[in-house]
Image: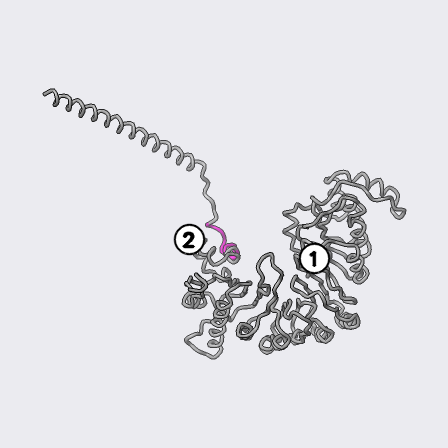
Amino acid sequence: MGDLDTLFDYEQQYAEFAAAEEAKTWEKEEHERLRREGLAREKEEDFEPSDWDKLPDLVLERIFSYLTVKEKYNASQVCRNWYHAFYYPESWSTFKFEDTTLTRRRFNYYSGWQYTLDHLRTQLCLCSVGNILKHLIFVPQTNFYNLYEFMNMISFYAEQERSGSKEFSRGIGSNVETLSYIFPCNQAYRNQPMELYGTGGKLLATLKRLMGNLCSLRCLQLVDLMLDFGDALHLLDEVCYSHCLTLRRLTLINVTRSKCSLLHIGVFLNLQILEISPQNLSEDGLYLLSEIETLSHLHIIQNKYTPQELTAVSPKAWKQLSKKKPDLQVHLQLVSNLEKGILWQDGAPVASIWYESPKIKVDGDSVSTAVEMYGPTLRFYGHTHPPKYHQSKSFRDRMDPFFVFLVNKCPNLTTLIIRERISTATVLLLASYGKKLKHLYIRRNAVILRNDWPKNSDWPEGFSIWLKKSCRSYETTEQEVSQILGFRWQMLSDKEFNKISPSLHNL
């Protein structure tokens, strides 16, 4: 009996302990539930419903046009209106083809997992949105086979459409107005010397086939093809045959790696804008361009792959072009992360000089050359991208006198972009001498509070006193410049300066 009583006592104690533990657990759960309800109630009180799902269709359509295919799909899952925006025509106006676009993974025993073009997915995509594509962009990529297959599919549908086949009458590629193709000519790894290779063979033949099949083409951009002389001579044969009257803008940058005159540029009778590298421009090409009445802008562009050992077109050819087309504007552009120099075109009616490079410094020789050659016609001069080199604070080592010299000797200058270190006194002088300045972009972090200009005998009475008083603070300098220019003017932060995207066609 004693053992049974002891066992009964143990069971009773265990039951009481279990009940106590259960009560504690219930209290904790209840406390947690009440806490969550309180937080939820607070969130409901603080929650303000947004109206992003009520955006107008035109705004949604424009937003979706900037998204990638994956981003479009993710955004379409948010609400019903965004789901409908996924199918708007403008949302698919721009199609960018990359390494992984419309691909699936496939294992290769030699290379491992590879992204290969999924033909079924590509066919479904083209049948759905192929007739509303307006801008077709091929970015630099490593898998040329996927690019080759995708171009062939678009060309096949376009050719079947033109032949009158009812089975393929979907209008795929019929509305493409812009074709951009950038070839990855540099095949070297990072931190290795450049190894430049050009395109050709079947890939080039496929590109030419595609260009000839896009019946609505208005803008064509071919960059860094690096072709041989023989391939370059016949590059635009199909385009000339199909679009000699419809092409409006043509970009040919580094089509060849050496000097090669491209005469196809003079065949497009309604061309308005031509962008070309200096190695593909010649006297014969300028003569043909002078016969195009609609041509208004000629961009001569150099990048880091453009060869250095080049000769400019003769001044006589430029003068003949200027005589026939007095309204033509020539733009010199250098886009490179290497230290290079612009190839000066003596006698050309240059309206703008634009350096898009973080490593090219402003030097007195280049500014003096620009003023000497293009002083009466120059309207734009600028260096963009944040500098990656040391800048001295000494007035002797800075470029302040050359900037003032540029503004003083170029009476038609309307846009000036300065990223170099200058003083507040220089900013005031630039605004005072720039009679036609409309756009003055200056980095605030590069401006120092200083009046280090010696007194000039040509200054009117009281000018030096005004200059000394106005350059003591950034706020006073901005107020005086605003009063001179006739509109509110401010120095730019580095973030704002990096976003500058000036238009060279509205100078």
Q: Which label sits on residue 339?
A: 1
* Residue in the foreground of this view, choosing between 399 and 257: 257
- In this picture, residue 316 sits left or right of residue 36: right
Q: Is residue 57 magenta?
A: yes
Residue occupying image coordinates x 40% and y 67%: 120
Amino acid of disc 2 = Gln
Rendered view: 207 above or below 61: below
Decide whether the magenta segment is chiefly helix, strand or loop: helix
* In the image, farthest residue toward the top: 2
Residue 379 magenta-drawn? no
- Residue 349's quadrant in the figure? bottom right
Q: Secondary structure at mark 2?
A: loop
Q: Is residue 198 placed above or below 74 in the rendered structure? A: below
Q: Which residues are magenta?
A: 53-62
Residue 85 vertical placement versus 235 (above, below): above
Amino acid on which disc 1 is placed: Glu
> x, y (%) of residue 110?
44, 64
Q: Residue 415: where, in percent of width, then height?
A: 73, 55
Relative depth, front residue between 498 and 91: 498
Q: Which quadrant is the C terminus positioned in?
A: bottom right
Look at the picture and state if 160 lies above or below 63.
below
Q: Are marks 2 and 1 in contact (CB under 8 Å)?
A: no
Report whether 215 appears left or right of 297. Answer: left
Residue 77: assigned label = 2
Horizontal side, residue 370 vs residue 223: left or right: right
Q: Residues within 10 Å of mark 2 (few under 14, many from 20)?
A: few
Towards the viewer: 317 or 200: 200
The furthest residue to the right: 457
Question: SS for tag 1?
Answer: loop
